[in-house]
Amino acid sequence: MAEDISGDLTEGQRSEAAAHMQALKRLSRDWLRDGLYPQWEQAYKNYKAEPELKLDQDGKVDEDLTSLGSPMTFSSARRTVARVTAQIPNFRFRSSESIEIQTKPDGQQVSVGELIGRTQMFQWDRSRMQRIQKKHALQAVLFGWSPRLWHWAVEVWPRSKRVDIGQAIQSPDTLRQIETTYEMEPGTLGNFLQQGDIETLQMLLTNLLDKNGRGGLLPIRYDYRSYEGPKADFCFIGDCYPEPHFQSIKESDWFITNKFRGFEWLRRLARDYPQTKSGVEDVMEAHPKGMGRRWDQNSDEDDQELFKNMLGTIDRSTNFDASEVQPKQAAHGQWLVTARHVPGREAFIEYAVDNVYIGKIPYPYDLNGRMAITDCVLIDDIVSGIGDSIPRIMRGLHKVHQDQLGYRTDLIKNLLRPLVATSSRELLANPDAIKRKHGFRMMYLRDPSQVWQQGEMSALAAAQAGLAEDQSMLHQYFMFTGENSMSATAGVDPSQTRTAAGVRYTAQQLDVLTKDLQDMFVQSAVIEDAEIMWLLNRSELADGFSFEMNQYNRTYAYEEERWKEIWAQVEPIHFQVEGEINVEAGSTLADDSQDRQQQAQVLMDIAMNRPDVLRIERARDEMLIAMGRRHQIPEWVPQPPPPPEPEIKRSMSVSFQWDKVDEADRIRLREHLDLQTDEEEAAEAAEQQQQQGAPTNGQEGISGEQLPV
């Protein structure tokens, strides 16, 4: 019965299958409820800084005792999330198969590994995964475990724009959009374009422009595909029911999830998988208007237990009756669909709504027998796949700190409130009649001589000692969580650890904790996510697409050609290459960031002194990366100097008849221009001819010359 996917099930088999799914979910819920739900509720309460109310012997809230919340868990969780998610993951695909891919428009060559890695980074950005990643990391930090469900998303949204009819004639796609917008027969405008009847086409478009135009442009509506690719939504742990005592989701026998689905999702399920059509009809018959959401009083208490308890711990009520706003039409309703994922060679998913069994379908994606589910565990536990978390471990320290704050607040509050005496029993019974109200302590006296001053030195000493103990408590908190205020280069008063060596030791210990959390986040979560994205692309990518590769260059080593615009065309065949995905991720907020800057400065100094040993450009890039300027490297690179201007050579020629110049002027010209006399020129010419073996012509002078000035 459970393995028959294609055949229709009888009514008895459907009831049995639904009961089997509910039994597995109750088994998982009981395991979570007994061991983890109370701890998760307390961790969430500490994260919200909700105070622990003090109870008296009768179990009632003691109004005389102060209960304060502490932001320690909130600060620790937010800082940890900021550290592990500060940098967007860098996917690296390595394959033994070498394929050179032609990019456009400049025709550069890239390998298939580089193309796949950058494609997945592009999909990560387009699917807006980084915000979901922060929720995913926060849930893992608070509760020790956070699951994530992946799917192949096709997001199509209606859009509108206005086009110029002169340009629309040249675009067949725009003509088809005009036909769809104005409900024309398909091909009406396109046939005129193919036949070359431009005048008729121009006339039709002009008529449409006259009736519907605005600003000389024709409005059209069309469907825009904003994204198609792998995507994961945030999944609340209260909606997940893993196999009890599982060690890894990859090795689990099954995994059950709850998710509210709309009418359109159920309609597509019945259309794509006919074996679920009768089950969807049964759901519509049993719940024609949908089911109550989390805030509805009529919702299933078992399925919403953790959600309601968490809100109850922070004094937020879910007591809201949604019966008056329930949709009247099924198309606007929501149904809580339970899905059981079963991996293996014959992987499948079966669905049910409440006790109504919808059906079972083969796994929609070919993921090599895996489920499209990943999880994140930052601190491993030796008992099960759900790990520990900082709030769960520090809850004892949180409670002690909170109690100390409450008791010290009560003590100081009573010491600082002035003591007022009165002989009026009416004021004693009704202190609100006085303007200051509860800002003082009041006692009844018949005679002023009945009161004397009593020093409260013990109480003052206790309050002062409590302030000193608070520093010690905060120091323990710093050691436990790894706050940046205890870093080696931070300006911390050494008295917090009594010695400067203690500060250094604490900083080294916290650096280890920080690096361990970053490594665990990459190894337990991001690498698994990258593999699922790669498998989904291999299984579901049908149409190629283009994207600009340059902005996903994660090498950050400056090379001028790398920063040019590089467009690549991704095709399904590229993901059929065998290989493995690696991920590079880190934090720019780690405690050792100051050390990285110092090391980068040392490399820069060596490169400046010995350029024959280290490249100055590479050392410069490393220093900019350590200082958080990795995306601004092209802006910091010096521009090449402009080429020198060509030297301007000026010359001038003057011609005159030398014979007509006076002798005195000849002498002055020879002296000014350093010219030879006729005898000197004749002697020099005779000497040159003698050296060349040529006879002299006996010429004594010249009749004219060109003299450069």
Image: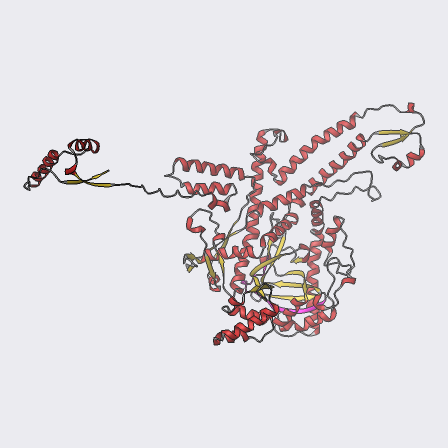
User: In the rendered view, does 488 fall on the left or right side of 558?
Assistant: right
Q: Quadrant of residue 425?
A: top right
Residue 63 in picture, x, y percent from top left: 82, 40
Question: Does 371 lie within the magenta span?
Answer: yes
Decide which of 232, 630 is in the foreground and name it: 630
* Residue 4 appears in view: no
Query: Is 382 within the magenta?
Result: no
Q: Is residue 9 visible?
A: yes
Considering only vertical position in the picture, is 123 above or below 458?
A: below
Q: Nearer the viewer, residue 176 or 7?
A: 176
The colour style of the image is secondary structure
Q: Position of residue 251 (x, y in %)?
A: 58, 58
* Nearest the eye: 299 or 388: 299
The range drawn in magenta is 355-373
How far from the left and from the top, in percent, is residue 595? Answer: 52, 37
Residue lying at 65% horizontally and 63% vertically, measured from the top left: 339
Between residue 373 and residue 127, name the one nearer to us: 127
On the rendered image, what quadrant is the N terminus found in? bottom right
Quarter of the rendering occupied by the C terminus: top left
Residue 205 placement, left or right of 327:
left
Number of numbered tags placed on the structure image: 0
Counting from the top left corner in percent of width and height, residue 95 is at: 45, 57
Above-or-below relation of 174 to 90: below
Q: Horizontal placement of 352 versus 599: left or right?
A: right
Q: Residue furthest left?
A: 695
Please give the name of the residue rendered at 42% of the width and 51% of the height, measured from the top-left corner.
561
Residue at (66, 67) in percent of width and height: 264
Q: Quadrant of residue 232?
A: bottom right
